């Protein structure tokens, strides 16, 4: 290319710094400054939030007791190992045997008879799990089957991961264990089943969030 | 049939699930050979020499590499899994042009195609063209093979031509650049080059290479003599280059290198992969779940449909549904309700993916509507105009909640939406709608050889008043606070580097044509540097839909910074068609440089016809043929790659009947557009984007009118290709 080239590039960047107004983003572009301030604001907010969260350290037992007192509906206690927090979740909807439980911040766990179907609002959500092993687990039987777990990849497309799972009795009495393998990884779900319902369980959400321990406080 | 094929195509999992795992599953899937470090030219490579490596598909990166030989700022895009493209702005030390600065500023493009990937004993092989548009300082071509010898050691060897063989091509000073000189490619004799890279650990890699580049340049002057230049101070002392690269975080890399043992350089790279979002599923709150209908015995009135006779039923339902939708970032514009069917018209204000807005609305409808309503019609709108309807049975929504998203896609019908439907009642208080904002703005001029980095900071107030669906009154007012983008006339013909002053230019209207060609953009700097308030935009726009597949727009007023007038557009885009046609005609007059209500003399009627096509894998193409601002006739080709998450990266080129001499440097207009959704970076649900248009603004040939609100992109969000691409978010 000619050495004496003259280039004038104009990138117009509208900054969101100290912006005000009532536009809602269906028509707005924001610039690098805007991103920087918004992201910084979010990080600050998260930090503040986490500081607040750690301040009144309520034990899970206390939290459970309080929730049972306040909320008359079905309740679970969920310990998210990947997020390092334990939360009480209340049922917000029921469609057949599928129940949606939410935290006060409207993060959701979707369970079918206690078995994890999906999560929402956690950033690395499980869209839907389809387990051929479901019947065996409920019946306390042994066997094997495939388990398909669907996730969003970063490009915005939902993709299935398929695992081969075997179900059998665990070391502890009353515990059914599901061992799954595929895509170079493996995980183990444990269920305590009573009357076809999973009362207590530790189930794998996905590669990023890891396991969640779910305890039924009120069925 | 056609629809389900589209769904299959779009939802098929063509990429390894490894994307979800990062490196965990690398044992299970054969890794493509991705580069470990960026070369000084800003693509995967050795130091100065290329390799056959690629970057992960879709990667967008930038590298600044600086040494005594110059500074190279490169933007790289992995356009296809095997195709790498680079745009580079360089400051090359040691070369004098008419400016007599001791350096030149140069723009160059590279492409690299990996023709074979590594398999068994076979190395990966790539062919590349460096600085290939016109003859330039870095022009060279190569064939290179790269092979992993051990998991940590990788070796590349190849043949290079041009600078890669130390035989730089003679550059013609009279050439305006910008055209292909394919005859020179792979000519002038080849020499071998080689590199070896050692991945010491996760972070550190060391590279050694044998390179033939002598860092020289030759120019053929107009009188036929050849000027010879040595870049930097000296030729490299030997052919051996060494480097160390350190990676930190997922996205950054810093490097130190030496060229020929005597010259040292530093470099810094950033790489973003659209597939690696921090929160791939988003952090938005969980949707309200489906509420199944009660048994008939529990609600006989609701099931019988007698409620529909009650005139107060619809307003109450509409109000409740509108409230619930607004909590989830949607506007319920209007609704038609009968005992067994409900149509809602929804304006999505929050989600990048229209399917998510539709899915959430469907669930809210199960919560708001009496049991006898079985058919849900969810019509998306853009700018007050309906763009498509999704019809779904309520029992399917109940039955398929939280299942694989393609199941609901196969039972839902996507159709063109008529502009109005019987029984449609507008939600009270939605119109007229007034929106406003006051924001700082920051205008940035980069890569200008004349001025270096310039910028301007100020405040912009913007308001939009939507009087009725589709009718918008929009205005903006800007006040500069400070900056160094000053008002200036265009360059003086025949005197490179010299410009008219603003006063000279404004007082002598004859300067507004240059050799018979009206200055339509080359005086763009006259519109900058205003210290008084300016009006960048003040328009009345009307969007309508005369038939189910035809959309129209009429915009009148001060359309953009430099032009005012009337702009009319029509677009044919059936909802399930990947093909669309459009036409636009504008009658515009040049605005005065104070950007208020005065005009200058130049007036033109211009416009184009357009064809649009949506290919597979997120590629779209657009062809515009018509007349441009300066009255020149020609065509623009635009190719854009977009991801389901909203990332868009495009390139365009315009060639008109204006001669290369009249057009000036670059020969034809070209540029790159980039748009990244904010939600991709932060996880929050928002339709806001960060966009950049990298283009040459100062040319008069192939200049387009910058009118806001062109139809295609607004209509397409809820049409088949884009809708099904993001359909996985229906149950989000």
Image (cartoon, coloured by chain):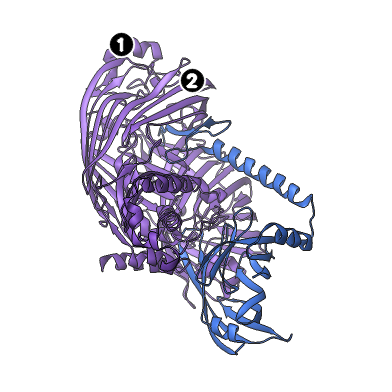
User: How far across and how far down the image is residue B467, in percent?
Assistant: 34, 30
User: How far across and how far down the image is residue B299, in percent?
Assistant: 43, 62
Decide: is B12 above or below B326. Answer: below
User: How far across and how far down the image is residue A139, in percent?
Assistant: 59, 86
Q: Residue at x 26, y 40 (%)?
A: B655
Q: Chain letter for blue?
A: A
Most foreground residue, A165 or B471: B471
User: Tag 1, which chain?
Assistant: B
Most foreground residue, B349 or B462: B349
Q: Residue at x 62, y 52 (%)?
A: A105
Q: Is residue B730 visible?
A: yes
The residue identified by callout 2 is: B479
Residue most extreme to the bottom: A142
The quadrant where residue A45 appears: top right
The reply to the same-chain question for discs 2 and 1 is: yes
User: Tag 2, which chain?
Assistant: B
Decide: is A29 above or below B503. Answer: below
């Amino acid at each position: 290319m000619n050495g004496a080239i003259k280039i004038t590039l104009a990138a117009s960047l509208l900054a969101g710094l100290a912006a005000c107004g009532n536009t809602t983003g269906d028509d707005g572009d924001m610039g690098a400054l805007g991103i920087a301030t918004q992201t910084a604001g979010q990080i600050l907010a998260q930090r503040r939030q986490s500081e607040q969260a750690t301040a009144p350290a309520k034990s899970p037992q206390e939290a459970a007791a309080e929730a049972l007192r306040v909320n008359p509906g079905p309740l679970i206690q969920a310990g998210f190992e990947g997020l390092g927090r334990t939360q009480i979740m209340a049922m917000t909807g029921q469609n057949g045997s599928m129940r949606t439980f939410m935290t006060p911040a409207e993060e959701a766990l979707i369970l079918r008879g206690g078995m994890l179907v999906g999560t929402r609002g956690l950033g690395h959500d499980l869209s839907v799990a389809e387990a051929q092993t479901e019947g065996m687990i409920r019946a306390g039987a042994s066997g094997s089957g495939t388990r398909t777990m669907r996730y969003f990849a970063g490009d915005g497309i939902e993709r299935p991961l398929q695992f081969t799972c075997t179900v059998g009795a665990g070391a502890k009495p009353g515990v059914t264990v599901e061992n799954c393998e595929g895509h170079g990884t493996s995980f183990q779900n444990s269920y305590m089943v009573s009357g076809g319902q999973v009362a207590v369980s530790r189930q794998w959400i996905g590669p990023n969030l890891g396991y969640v321990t779910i305890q039924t406080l009120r069925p | 049939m056609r629809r389900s094929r589209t769904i299959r195509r779009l939802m098929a999992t063509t990429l390894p699930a490894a994307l979800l795992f990062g490196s965990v599953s690398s044992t299970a899937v054969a890794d493509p050979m991705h580069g470990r470090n960026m070369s000084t030219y800003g693509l995967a490579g050795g130091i100065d020499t290329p390799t056959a490596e690629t970057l992960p598909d879709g990667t967008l990166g930038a590298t600044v590499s600086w040494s005594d030989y110059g500074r190279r700022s490169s933007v790289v895009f992995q356009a296809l899994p095997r195709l790498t493209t680079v745009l580079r702005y360089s400051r090359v030390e040691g070369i004098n042009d008419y400016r007599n600065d001791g350096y030149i500023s140069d723009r160059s493009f590279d492409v690299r195609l990996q023709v074979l990937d590594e398999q068994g004993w076979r190395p990966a092989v790539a062919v590349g063209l460096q600085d290939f548009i016109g003859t330039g300082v870095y022009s060279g071509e190569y064939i290179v093979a790269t092979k992993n010898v051990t998991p940590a050691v990788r070796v590349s060897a190849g043949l290079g031509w041009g600078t890669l063989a130390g035989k730089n091509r003679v550059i013609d000073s009279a050439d305006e650049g910008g055209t292909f000189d394919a005859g020179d490619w792979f000519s002038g004799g080849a020499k071998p080059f080689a590199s070896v890279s050692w991945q010491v650990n996760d972070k550190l890699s060391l590279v050694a290479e044998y390179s033939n580049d002598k860092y020289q340049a030759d120019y053929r002057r107009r009188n036929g003599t050849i000027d010879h230049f040595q870049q930097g101070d000296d030729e490299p002392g030997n052919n051996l280059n060494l480097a160390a690269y350190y990676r930190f975080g997922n996205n950054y890399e810093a490097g130190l290198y030496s060229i020929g043992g005597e010259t040292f350089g530093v470099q810094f790279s950033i790489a973003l992969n659209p597939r690696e979002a921090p929160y791939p599923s988003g952090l938005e709150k969980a949707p309200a779940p489906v509420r199944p209908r009660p048994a008939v015995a529990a609600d006989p009135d609701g099931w019988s449909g007698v409620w529909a006779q009650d005139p107060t039923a619809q307003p109450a339902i509409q109000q409740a549904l509108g409230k619930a939708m607004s909590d989830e970032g949607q506007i319920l514009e209007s609704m038609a309700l009968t005992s067994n069917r409900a149509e809602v018209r929804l304006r999505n204000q929050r989600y990048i993916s229209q399917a998510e807005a539709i899915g959430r609305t469907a669930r809210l409808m199960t919560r708001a509507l009496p049991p006898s309503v079985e058919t849900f019609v969810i019509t998306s709108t853009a700018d007050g105009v309906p763009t498509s309807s999704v019809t779904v049975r309520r029992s399917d929504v109940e039955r398929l909640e939280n299942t694989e998203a393609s199941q609901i896609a196969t039972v839902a019908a996507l159709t063109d939406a008529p502009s109005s439907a019987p029984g449609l009642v507008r939600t009270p208080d939605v119109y007229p709608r007034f929106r406003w904002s006051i924001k700082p703005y920051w205008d940035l001029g980069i890569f200008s050889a004349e001025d270096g980095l310039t910028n301007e900071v100020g405040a912009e107030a913007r308001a939009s008043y939507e009087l009725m669906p589709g009718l918008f009154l929009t205005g903006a007012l800007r006040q500069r606070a400070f900056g160094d983008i000053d008002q200036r006339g265009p360059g003086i013909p025949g005197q490179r580097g010299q410009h008219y002053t603003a006063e000279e230019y404004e007082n002598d209207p004859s300067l507004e044509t240059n050799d018979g060609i009206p200055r339509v953009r080359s005086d763009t700097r006259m519109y900058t540097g205003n210290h008084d308030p300016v009006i960048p935009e003040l328009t009345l726009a009307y969007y309508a839909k005369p038939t189910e597949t035809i959309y129209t727009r009429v915009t009148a007023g001060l359309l953009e910074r430099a032009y005012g007038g009337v702009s009319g557009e029509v677009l044919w885009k059936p909802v399930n068609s990947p093909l669309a046609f459009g036409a636009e005609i504008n009658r515009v007059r040049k605005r005065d440089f104070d950007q208020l209500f005065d005009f200058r003399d130049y007036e033109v009627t211009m416009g184009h016809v357009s064809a649009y096509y949506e290919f597979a894998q997120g590629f779209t193409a657009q062809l515009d043929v018509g007349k441009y601002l300066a009255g020149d006739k020609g065509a623009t080709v635009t190719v854009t790659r977009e991801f389901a998450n909203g990332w868009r990266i495009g390139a365009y080129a315009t060639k008109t009947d204006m001669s290369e001499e009249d057009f000036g440097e670059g020969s034809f207009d070209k540029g790159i557009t980039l748009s990244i959704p904010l939600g991709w970076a932060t996880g929050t649900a928002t339709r806001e984007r960060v966009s950049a248009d990298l283009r040459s603004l100062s040319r008069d040939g192939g200049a387009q009118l910058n009118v806001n609100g062109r139809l295609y992109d607004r209509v397409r969000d809820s049409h088949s290709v884009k809708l099904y691409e993001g359909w996985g978010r229906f149950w989000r």
